[in-house]
Image: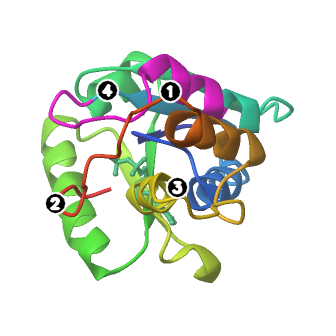
Amino acid sequence: MIKAVFPGSFDPIHNGHVDIAKRASRLVDELVIAVYDKPLKNFLFSPEERIDMVKKVFLNDSKITVTGYSGITVHFCQQIGAQVMIRGLRVFSDFEYEFRMALANHRIEPEVEVMALITSEEHTFLSSSTVREISSLGGNVSTMVPEHVKIALDAKFNTPGNDQRVIPSHSIRD
Ligand code: ADP
């Protein structure tokens, strides 16, 4: 029985994340999508909003559950009895970051294996920050995110009276 955790900020979830989660779930018995709150990051959506948006995507998928967590990811994996952590890889810069994280995590908790899946070609450019920026500038993100996420982004950026602006994220990896 293989249980895996797919951790991330999911601010918000986009089609690249959905693709990785679906492909990973075919390789394991149970996949827990774990939505975390990094204190150093400025999130657009609250933890509750991000969890809710991820849950809506996988409502009918019996292998996938969604939960929030905080703290060290490999500790969370251990707590819930997951042997594997799933990550998605886009470009070379992802590799360097994920490589460092995998080694650090292995040092902290050698029992948890990191499994990295290569992004599907059509999602190579997709990131939550790209989606946020395009949406904040009035661009159409309907080919990048599930419908309910687009509605949530429109509500954040376009609703009259809602003056929330995107935080320039050039310096934020995500
Ligand atoms: P984090 O803050 O952990 O990077 P994200 O929500 O940005 O959280 O990403 C969660 C995981 O999804 C990471 O492993 C990231 O590399 C992966 N990921 C993000 N975008 C894509 C994409 N377009 N294709 C494949 N994997 C992706």
Residue 135 is labelled as 3
Residue 37 is labelled as 4
Q: Amino acid at mark 2?
A: Ser
Q: Amino acid at mark 4?
A: Asp
Q: Earlier in the sequence, mark 4 or mark 3?
A: 4
Return the x and y of residue 78 as percentages of the image width and height: 36, 24
Q: Earlier in the sequence, mark 1 or mark 2?
A: 1
Q: Amino acid at mark 3?
A: Ser
Return the x and y of residue 149 as percentages of the image width and height: 65, 42
Residue 45 is labelled as none
Q: Amino acid at mark 1?
A: Gly
Q: Which label sits in the foreground, 4 or 3?
A: 3
Q: Which residues are magenta?
A: 38-54
Bin the neighbour count of mark 4 within 10 Å (Cα to Cα): few under 14, some 14-19, many 20 and up: some
Q: Is residue 19 visible?
A: yes
Question: From the viewer's perspective, is residue 144 above or below residue 3?
Answer: below
Gap between marks 3 and 2, in whole Å?
A: 18 Å
Q: Are marks 3 and 2 in contact (CB under 8 Å)?
A: no
Q: Which label sits in the foreground, 4 or 2?
A: 2
Q: Earlier in the sequence, mark 4 or mark 2?
A: 4
Does residue 157 appear to the left or right of 164 in the view shown? right
Q: Earlier in the sequence, mark 3 or mark 2?
A: 3
Residue marked by disc 2: 171
Gap between marks 4 and 1, in whole Å?
A: 27 Å
Does residue 93 appear to the left or right of 145 in the view shown? left
